[in-house]
Amino acid sequence: MVKKTSLRRRAQPKNTNVYQRSKFDGRSLNLNTKTRSARSATHYSRQYKPDQHSKSELNKSTQKLSFSKVFSGFLAFTIAILLLYASSLSTDVIVLRHSESYNFQDVQKYQQQAGQVVKSNLLNRSKLLFSIRRFNQEMRNNYPEITKIQTTVPLVSRRLIVTIQTPPPLLRIKQNSNQQLYVSSNGLVIDGKKIDSSDELPPELDIQSDQLFKPKDKILNDNEVRILTLINQQINSKNIANLPPDFQISTVKLDLLSSRLEVRFKGVKYRAIFSGYGEAINQVGALKSILQKIYQSSPEGRVAEPKEYIDLRVYEKIFVK
């Protein structure tokens, strides 16, 4: 009889020593891993830790960078100051007088006034903001004898260059006052103190008005000034032959309301009548035409010399009496 053998395996006894060794080996493994990591970190920190030489070089480069920034800022500030100075204008203005100008007063007076105009407005101190038109107008307002003014803003220099033209006075005003006044070639009243008494006096202006005028007043309009200027040009240019030797304007009578001009000449009895509203070149051209016929050398076509007046106020018509 066969004896049955039990298929159940007997439980093997626990090997506590193996388990403890494995557990101990795990701790050892963990301990070894931590130790190696710590050593690696120490080695890494020692390997990449900058030395004292690298620190000094870093400090030097930082100082160089800071110095470079400060120097660049200072250089930019200096350049800005220089540009601002170069673009500013000095109050010391150069004033030149045109060669054909009348010497109303010393050039230094105009220079002082020009400097005051530049100084009076902060915008005038800058080349970029300076207004030539405003400057010229202020100079004319202060000195009515200035008929033309040219102002140049220099590119390099800081001094303005101003060229003025002050023609001789056109007329001398006759009025009941102790103050002697003159009329400039732009129709403005000028103080007689600026006129040299030794110079030849200009023609006298007789104004048909009780109004008293003062310097800088506008007494003649532009067309009236042009009429008188053209008459002087025709006489002085010798375009009219055989005129009397002293044929010049002696007096001018002005009616302010009607703008009627009566011009008398030296050496003759008649007067020429003009309208301040009519075209100047047409009226003076008609005067030239009739004078040529009066003083022509040939008796053929000659016109008798008027006894009273030559009226030129109507376009393309001449009335003689």
Image: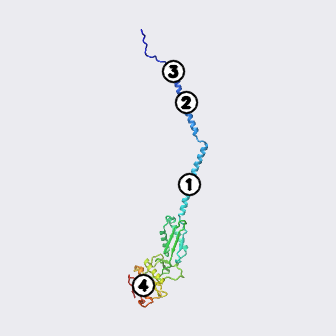
- Asked whether disc 3 touches disc 4, contact meaning CB atoms under 8 Å apart, the reply is no
Q: Position of residue 251 (x, y in %)?
A: 46, 84
Q: Amino acid at mark 2?
A: Asn
Task: Characterize the local packing of mark 2: few (<14), some (14-19) or many (20 or more) Cα atoms within 10 angstroms.
Answer: few
The disc, 4 or 1, on the residue closer to the chain's N-terminal end is 1
Above or below, 320 against 226 in this view is below
Task: Give the residue at mark 1.
Answer: 72
Which quadrant of the figure contains the C terminus?
bottom left
- How much space separates mark 3 and mark 4, taking CA atoms? 152 Å
- Asked whether disc 4 touches disc 1, contact meaning CB atoms under 8 Å apart, the reply is no
Task: Characterize the local packing of mark 3: few (<14), some (14-19) or many (20 or more) Cα atoms within 10 angstroms.
Answer: few
Q: Residue 175: tell me if it is visible.
A: no
- How much space separates mark 4 and mark 2, taking CA atoms? 132 Å
Task: Give the residue at mark 2.
Answer: 32
User: In the image shown, does 41 or 162 lie closer to the viewer?
Assistant: 41
User: In the image shown, does 218 or 313 lie closer to the viewer?
Assistant: 313
Q: Which one is in front in this view, the residue at disc 3 or the one at disc 4?
A: 4
The disc, 3 or 2, on the residue closer to the chain's N-terminal end is 3
Q: Amino acid at mark 1?
A: Ser
Task: Give the residue at mark 3.
Answer: 16
Which quadrant of the figure contains the N terminus?
top left
- Asked whether disc 3 touches disc 1, contact meaning CB atoms under 8 Å apart, the reply is no
Above or below, 105 against 37 in this view is below
Q: Residue furthest right?
A: 53
- How much space separates mark 4 and mark 1, taking CA atoms? 78 Å
The disc, 1 or 2, on the residue closer to the chain's N-terminal end is 2
Task: Give the residue at mark 4.
Answer: 289
